[in-house]
Structure formats: C-alpha cells, structure tokens
Image: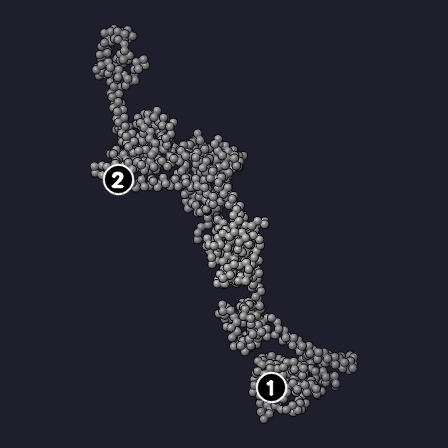
Amino acid sequence: MVFIVDDDASVRRSIQDLLSSVALRAEAFATPQQFLESKRAAGPGCLVLDVRLPGMSGLDCQRRLAEAGVSIPIIFITGHGDVPITVRAMKSGAVEVLTKPFRPQELLDAVQQALDRDRTSRDKRRQAAEVRNRYETLTAREREVLKLVVAGLLNKQIAAKLGTSEHTIKIHRGHMMDKMQAPSLAALIHMADTLEILPATVQ
Amino acid sequence: MIRVQRHDSEVVTTPVQGRKHKGSILVFDDEPATLQPLFTILTEDGYVVSERRLDLESHLRFVKDTLPDLVLVDVRTRTDGYQLCASLKNDPSTRTVPVIFISSMDRSINQARALVSGAVDYVTDPFDAEEVLWRIETHVSLRHLREYLESAARHDVAQPVAPNEDLERAFQEIRVLTQITGRKHAEEKVRQAARELEQTQAALQASERNLILTINTIPTFITVSRADGTVLSVNQAALDYHGITLQEVQRGEHRTRFYHPDDVERVRELRNEGLKHPRPFEYELRAMGKDGTYRWFSVRHSPLLDAQGRIERWYAIAFDIEDRKRAEDAQARQTGVRADVGAAFSKPTHLGEILRGCTEAIVRHLDAAFARIWTLNKDESVLELQASAGMYTRLDGSYSRIPVGDLKVGSIARDKKAHFTNDVTNDPRVNDKGWARDNGMVAFAGYPLVVEDRLIGVLALFARRPLAESILDTLASVADTIAQGIERKRAEDALTRARAELAHIARVTTLSALTASIAHEINQPIAAATTSAGACLRWLNREQPEVQRAREAVMRIEEDVKRAAAIIDHLKAFYKKDFSPEREAVSINDLVEEMVVLLRSEADRHSVAMHAELTTNLPSVRADRVQLQQVLMNLMLNGMEAMTDRGGELTIRTGRERGEVVVSLSDTGVGIPADKLEDIFKDFVTTKAGGTGMGLAISRTIIESHGGRLWAMVNPGPGATLHFTLPTEPRPK
C-alpha cells in the first residue's frame, strides 16, 4: 500500500493513477494530519510526501511519525530542488527526494525501492521480535552470561567475573544457547546486535 | 314689432313697441338692402331710422327740416358724401348734427377726407354691429348733451330735456351754480363746458386715428377672428410681412403658403384645439416673409367673451421672436458642445479617442460637415491628424500629416492665427475649390490650438452653411478648451506613465524575490501532468490496454496544462509594462483568489496559513487589474513577512460598505507601532532588510488613483490589519 500526502488534488490524483496503472494500491491524503489519523492496514507500504505543506511541513510529519514509532519508508517530493531540505530529508532516512516535475518512472522506482525496504525492515523487525521473545525467556543469570559471552570472554573469565565455577557457567551457557536457538557464537552475536546489547568495544 | 314704411324713395322704421326712444337717425344711401341688417339692429335698439335717396340740395333741406339726431352717409351714394357732410357743417342750423360715414362691401372710405369734411366717425365694412351701435349711441348722446347745454345757456336752465343721468347731474350742477353766482356766471360755465366738450371730441377722434395708425404700423401682427376662427381683419404689418392681401388671409392661404412645412400640422392642431376653449392659448411657429426667409413668431390668442362667457372674438397677436430663438439656439449649441467636449475629456481613455469625441461634438452641435483635429509633432514640425468626424472619419488620408506652413491648416499653425470664411470657393487660402463646390461646402473655420503661446495643434472644420458669428465665438472658446485639455491630458499621461514605470519596477523586484515560490506553483500542475502522462502510457501498454483510464489521464493532463498556462498568464501580466492602463470591470473576489493561488507556496515557505473570507455577490469595481493585483500582492507579502520565523495566519476579507468594496488583510505578525501607522505609506520607509520602501507607497498611489483609500490599523490581538476601499461600479440597468 502506498500512501500519498500532497495538498494539490491534481498531483494526488495523478500519482494515485500512475500507481494503479502498475497495479499498486494507493491511498491519498490532503494533509499530514489526515494521514496520521487514518487507520492503516498492516502490510508493507510507503509514503509519498510533499515537502512543503500548509500547516505542517513534510519534514515535521516525518519527525512526528518517528516519534510515534511508525516506521514507514518516505519518498519526498518537492516543488523545487532545495538542497538543504533534500539533505535533511535524506539524513532523516528518506528513501528518495524527487523534484517536481519528476519522471513517472523515477517515482515508480523509488516506490518499488521503498516497498522492498519496508518488506526487508519488516522481516528484520519480525526476526528481532522473535529474538527478543527468546531473550525474554532467559533467567537473569543466563542474560548475564549472554552479555559476557558476546563480549568475547571465555567461560573461565565469566566464572571469575560472576564468582562461580566454570562448570556452572557451562550449564548456564548451554541453556542460554538452547533458549536463544543460537547454532553458533556468531549467530548469538548477531542476535545480541539485534537486541542492541552489544558492548561498545565489540562494535 | 318693426313697422317699415316703404315709399319710392323712403323707408322709415319705427322702434319696437315699448322700447325707449333713443333718437332719430337719417340715412343717406343708394342701396338700402345692403345696410338693412344694420337698420334692423338700430331699430331694435330704440332708434327711428329714416332713409333718403335724394340729390344734394334735397338732402340738405331735409336735414334742416327734420334736424335728426345723427346722419349716416353711405359713401356709395350718388351724391358726394364728403360734399354733403361739408355743406351740413357749413350751415349753422345743421352744424351740430353729427355725421358718420359708413361703407358697405368693397368701397373704402377716404378716412382723411371724411374727417376733414367734418364727420365725427366712420365705420367700414366688415363692421361689427355692436361697435356701430356703440359709436352711434355715443354721438347721439353727445349731441343731446350739447343741445341741452346750449339751450340751457340760451334760455332758462330749469327745464330738463331728457331723463338722462349724466344730463340730470349736469343740470343739477348748473342750477346750483345759477343760484349762487347768477345767470351770467352760469352762461360762462355752460360755454366753457361746451368748449371742453368739443375739445374732448376732437381729442377722441385724434386718439382713434392714432390707435389705427399704431395698430397698422407696429411690428406686431394682429388678427381679429370670429369665434370659429374665420378671420375678420389683420393689421397692415402682418399683410406687409407676408406680402399678402386681407382676402388671401381670410381664405386661410397664409397658413399653408407661409408657415414652415414642419410647423403647419402642429400649429393646425394647436389652433383647432385652442379655439374650442374660452381661454388664451399660444404657440411658436416659423413663418416666411416676403423675402422668402423664415422667422420665428410667438402667437398668442386671447378670446373676447360676451356676458354669458361665450367666445365672441379672438384676438391673435404674433411677436417676432427670431432674435430670441437665435440666441437660444446659439446658447443651446454652446452648452451642448461644451458639455460634450467636457465629457470627452473626462473619459478615462487615450487622447485620440478623446479628440474624436471633441470633433463629433463639433459636428453634432455646430453645423460642421466634418471637423478635424491635428496635433503638432514638434520634432518633425508636422501636424498629425488625430481625430476626424462627420463626412470623413479616416485618419490615414492625404491630410494625415501636414507640415507646418503647408496648406491652410499648416498656415494656421505657422501663424498661430485663426482663419475662417463663409465663401470658400472665393477664398485664396482654400486650395480644394473644386472639391468644395462639388460637396456644397460654403464655410471653413480653422483655429490654432495654443496654450501659453505654445502651438499644440489645429482644429478645423468645413460647413455647408454659413457659420454665424455666435458659432465662431463658440468654436474659438472650444478650441481653447481642447488645447488646454490636450495639454492636461498629456501631463496626466506622463504622470501615469511614470507611475506605471515605478509600479512595474516594484512588481519585477517583488517577483524576482518570489521566483522560487512561483516556480513551485507552476511545477505543481506540470508534475501532475507528467505523472498523468506516465500513467496514461502504462494503461495503454498493458496486455489488455485500459483505454478508459488512459482517456481519463489525458483529460487530467489537459486540465493541468490549462492551470499552468493560467498561472503563467497571471505572471506575464505582472511583468507587462502597462503604460496606458485600461480600466475594466474587476471582481475583487476573483482577484483575491488568484493571488492566494500565486502566493500559496510563498505562504508555505513562511509557514503562514492563508484564509480568504469573501463576501459573495460583491459588485465589481472599475479598475486596472494588474495594478490591483500588485496592491494585493504587496499587502499579502507584507503580512507574511511580518510573520516570518514565527508563522501565523493571514486572513483576507472582502465586504461592502456604502457603495464601496472593502478589502482587509489581517496578519498575526509583529504588528506596527501605533505612531508609525501613517509612516509606513511614505516613500522609502521600510522595516525590511531587502525592501525598497516603495511597496506600500505605490499601493496607496494605486488605490487613490482608483478613487479609494488605503490605511493600516493595529489589531486588538497580535499583528496589524491593512484596509483598502474601492468605489463600486454602478450596476448595469
């Protein structure tokens, strides 16, 4: 699903029609408020957003979405190549900034790219959620062991740090690896990265 | 009952039984039948009328024998009437018998001879019975009085002769006088009275002669008619003016022969209607004199009514009002041409159009066959034809450019001296004599258009009728008005041009600052169109082409392209150098909406939300569209700039107040200090870093040149409000 926010009805309609012509479903809004208040269906999607809008600018809208934890790839369209705005938009994670009048194929490519990105990030998020669920099943001791394992410490060093025997650590480690469904240390490190619990020195 | 005795040579009528006997009248005539109606009337009124047809000697004897109260002499009598009268007056015994001459039918009385021979009066045919009665009665009474007084003087005064009131009074007076002063004195008194009486009589005759003389010689025309309008008499002046006889007038010929063809029918109707009612009526008409020219007359009919209020006679008096009419006409022409020339100069249009209005006014009001105005091209010393009205209206003919000094028009310019003639075919300065003859041109008048001794141009005209002095006077003053008008119009145009130049510079400056915003605004429809074009191609390139969807896309493209073109048109108008602004009917609401579209992106850039609160059904204003757009743009941008870095709302309202459209723009910006509310409209006063300080000054000039006002007010809340008014166009009926 592609969402379009542009105050110009004609621009809205033409983009919607262009997307329909390549069998993409689209929903259009005249203002960011309307978009933010709408009930959006689940599934991969992207947002085509006019930079300059009355009341709330496209960049403000982007920020509001981020604050609300809504993660949707954004393609900005702007009436003129305004370099500072383009830079800001790209920095804030925009997929593309298109200057009106843009070539229809450019928009379609950008939309396709955004949808792919959304699909990927959705997969990632789903995987991360799974890892988090698994992480939630760990005991406090197992979580401590996990942190120290991904920090690269050996079992003996962990035992020393936690003030217990190396044997006990091995058992915790085995449970932890099972619960996290980690086939290897490399896979565990990847999971820890997803969970954002990697110590800074490793990164 | 009248008893008429008829003998061979004598007819005597006696008064109707029971009527007072007024006196005896002796008539000398040859054909009694013609005067018979008069005798009947006299008899009915109480006179004994005796008629005699005798020779002179017998006449004299008969008068001596009978001593009638009055003798009526028909001038047609075989005997000489004047001789008879003179003989009676010579004989002391018949001297006091009054003689009145009477004529019937066509025989006229030699009035002078009649009076010299001693007649007291004369009556001419056609005569009025009542008038004759009155005259006869007067003279009979006078005779009675005289006889009485004379006998009273001769004999004893104590015997009254007739039961006449006047006589009674005189008798009383004389008796009293006799008692007081004695007979001698009374005699003297009586003689004096008799002398006075004779003097009175002579004076009466003289004044009547004067009256007749007056009536016949005054330039006023007098007509006496019967109740039905048939003419009885006309004074000599009227007959002389037309060169017509009384008989012709009586046949009514003068109305068709001498009245102006355009007046005949109107006057006939007015007269027929007027004659029906016993009250005065009047009308004006043109009547031709002997010399074949028409003059204007004012005719007033006044009725003479009898005791019962019936119309007995009509007295019509006709005054010559030609001079007054001419003055009125000249006045009307002058007023008309002045008004039209004034109106031409008050029109908000270019000089050529104004001058065309002037030449048209001259043709319309001053009898010109055609009139032209040239203006001087000083650099080339050439007169350039600006306007031509009448039989020639082209401006590109052989007279379109005349070097100063060439032809008659050029010489008028060179000499700065007017030239006119009422005889063009013999005027040495008129070169197209053949043309003038062929086209019946009679008069030419040309005037230099001069202001403070500077030549501006030439006004010239040809006419098929001689130009009266009053028209030449009017033309001279109109030429003056036109010269000054041209001068003023040129100054105004120069001012307008300077103002427009300034406004244009201001517009271009403003627009260059707006380039980015405007580009965005144009890019909107272009983006929509290219996107729709992409969609269209993709609908068609499908395995099963979706023609309907493709068609819809193309229709959208068409709309978007139109929209883009419209925005570009607005912009073009802004960039246009508009030096001779044309005013047109402008809808303020449409203008506000256009400007909101054009400045939408600019508002977004300033994070300003624009609202238009427009009153519907506003009357249009007569204005220069581009200039008003400029004012709106200036005020809107000012409002936005007042809100830079803080955002806010710009509200544009339109409304109506007492025949004016009111537009107000409220911002929620930094506002204006109350003591600077007027300063902001001064030239070069600015609060903005990049401003020229001319925006509001130009805006005020523009609004004031449209007859409106522009002012600023402090808002109760944040920001300021700028208001302007414009007079509304009168609604078309």
Q: Tag 2, which secondary structure?
A: helix
Q: Which image quarter is the N terminus of chain A in?
A: top left
Looking at the picture, tell me which residue is in the foreground, B696 or B51.
B696
Q: Taking B623 as reference, is B447 above or below it?
A: below
Mark 2 sits on what residue? Answer: B549
Residue B371, position as x, y percentages in the image = 50, 56
Residue A110, position as x, y percentages in the image = 29, 29
Q: In this rendering, would B193 be left or right of B652?
A: right
Kindly identify the amino acid type of the residue bearing the numbered disc 1. Arg
Label 1, label 2: how far apart the Cα atoms are: 123 Å
Tell me what residue is drawn at x 44 percent, y 31 percent.
B644
Residue B238, position as x, y percentages in the image = 57, 73
Sort mark 1 into few (<14), some (14-19) or many (20+) by Cα contacts within 10 Å. some
Q: Taking A181 as reference, is A15 above or below it?
A: below
Mark 1 sits on what residue? Answer: B76
Kindly identify the amino acid type of the residue bearing the numbered disc 2. Arg
* Residue B548 disc label: none
Quadrant assignment, res B106: bottom right
